[in-house]
Image (cartoon, rainbow, N blue to C red):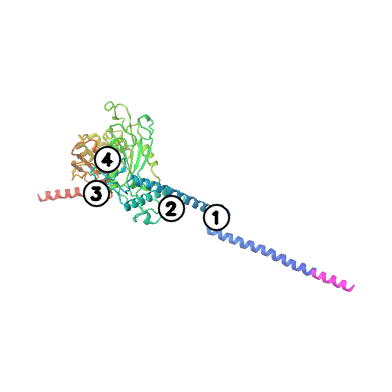
Amino acid sequence: MKKSRRKIKIMQRSLLYSKKYSKKGMLFNIMLVIFTIVILTTAFVRLSAKKCMDLSSQACLEKVLGSDPIDVMLKVQDGSKAMIYLDVAARFALYQALFDLQAKGGLASTSDCGTYFDFALWKNAKGIFCVPEQKDAEQALKQYATSNILARLYKYPHADFINGIPLEFTGFATTPAVPGAPPGIKLQPATGAGSHRCPAVTQEYVKEFTYTSTEHPEWFPPNGVSVIIPPEGNCPGPLPMIVYFHGCHKGTVSTGAKSAEDLLNTMRVLVNQGKADPVVIVIPTQKNGQGWADAPNGVCGPALWGSAFDIKEVVDQAQQNLPKGVTVSSLSFVGHSGAGCNLEGGLHRAADLYPNAYAIGVFDVCSGDLYGKSFQNKLSPQTKILITYASMGKGRSVENKILGISQTIACPTTETIAANGEFSTCSSNSKGMRFGYDLKIADHHASVAVGFEHMLKQFFSAAGVGAGVGEEIEEKEAEEKEEQVIA
């Protein structure tokens, strides 16, 4: 009995101690849970604070748990896509580079032997060979591959390939970046008109679009407006835009007319030789009209570039059809023959719509009192003007006087056209911003290429002679004053 009682007491004591310690254990567990919650909450707040300094902001309140890991996975996927794009772009760039190399006859520039349907010749008519050496062909291939891969990398929006390319590969200049260029791209400096040169040679950009007239859509052909950029300017950055109006002859799709082809070839030669900076040329085409009995096979009269043609719409559409990254830094207009004979259309309408245009090129158009006053009254005094007179320059003296083109200057030398490119007399205004050039031989069609050459060299070149002409005029005036004082 005594043993059984003793066992009962021992069991009672054990039960009492177990209850006492179980309460302590339970209290410990509860405190451990609370402590853990406090630590995790503090850690969450601290980590969130690194992302969101203001915890009360809407962005922090909307932040979803797990969004950072998801962002990391998406970035990895974007990186994989970019690598795939880079691999395919490099492959196609090499294919295109090989095509460009064979089209240029293994040369990086134009062959000295000339071209045949844009393909370089290795032997000219005089029997002179222009076969490229292997090292020249390899260097040319590298340049073509570089320009082609860069052109494709520019277009990929989800990765910045350019900043990771070594300068020795791209050949980028070390001059300050031009406004409008993508980050990391170093372009050569702009001129007053706002141009740039690409760090590597690319291809000429040609894009055609259709202008639909609300009055007479049948007068303007499908894909009748061309936007053309020389290879040296076909990369992101600012470029001047020049709109060319052909004259009283039937326009052809893409080139407007032969005069437009002359204009394009002039631009290509000067830009390639570094005597003019790259520009965007916009060439609209008009093929029909009303009341043109004097030109049954062409277009002439008041309807040429008249009310049926919306200049602003064409300029806007041309800007929309530029390559990605190319911006318009200035706007200019040039015209030939009948493009300057309608006081309500063509060049005169452009002057009315864009009085602050950078420059106006007037190539043997109707001249005289009314035409001079139109430009003088509509255009800003800061707008540069260059006029070439040939067979239609009967009113040149009156027009020059109205525009202030009264100072005789030394005539510049024409380079791009061998025949009929010489001037007989040349004049300028006192500021060296307006010029009137008389062709020695009154060649109406040559006035386009000749006028455009000197317009590009004087107004669209870092080494333009416009300022030099102004200084020459000032020196001449000073000499005349000295002679008067001596007399």
Mark 2 vs 1, N-terminal side: 1
Residue 135 position within the rendered picture, expressed as x and y whole percent measured from the top left: 32, 53
> Magenta stretch?
1-14
Cα separation between marks 4 and 3: 18 Å
Name the one closer to the observer, 150 or 422.
150
- Crowding near pointer 2: few (<14 within 10 Å), some, many (20+)? some
Q: Which residue is mark 1?
A: 68
Q: How far across and how far down the image is residue 434, in percent?
A: 24, 43
Using the numbered discs, state the Cα–Cα distance from disc 2 to disc 4 in whole angstroms.
41 Å
Q: Which residue is mark 3?
A: 467
Select label 1 or label 3 by which is in front.
1
Badge number at residue 361: 4
Three-letter amino acid code at the position of disc 4: Gly
Label 4: element kind: strand
Mark 2, secondary structure of its residue = loop
* Amino acid found under the numbered disc labelled 3: Ala
Nearer to the camera, 475 or 484 = 475
Residue beneath the point at 18% across and 50% down: 475
Q: Distance from label 2 to label 1 (Cα)? A: 24 Å
Q: Is residue 420 above or below residue 93?
A: above
Disc with the residue nearer the chain's start (1 vs 3) = 1
Residue 13 included in the magenta stretch of the image: yes
Q: Main secondary structure of the magenta part?
A: helix
User: Is residue 10 something that shows in the picture?
Assistant: yes
The answer for how far apart the CA atoms under marks 3 and 2 are is 41 Å
* Outermost residue to the left: 487
Q: Which mark is residue 161?
A: 2
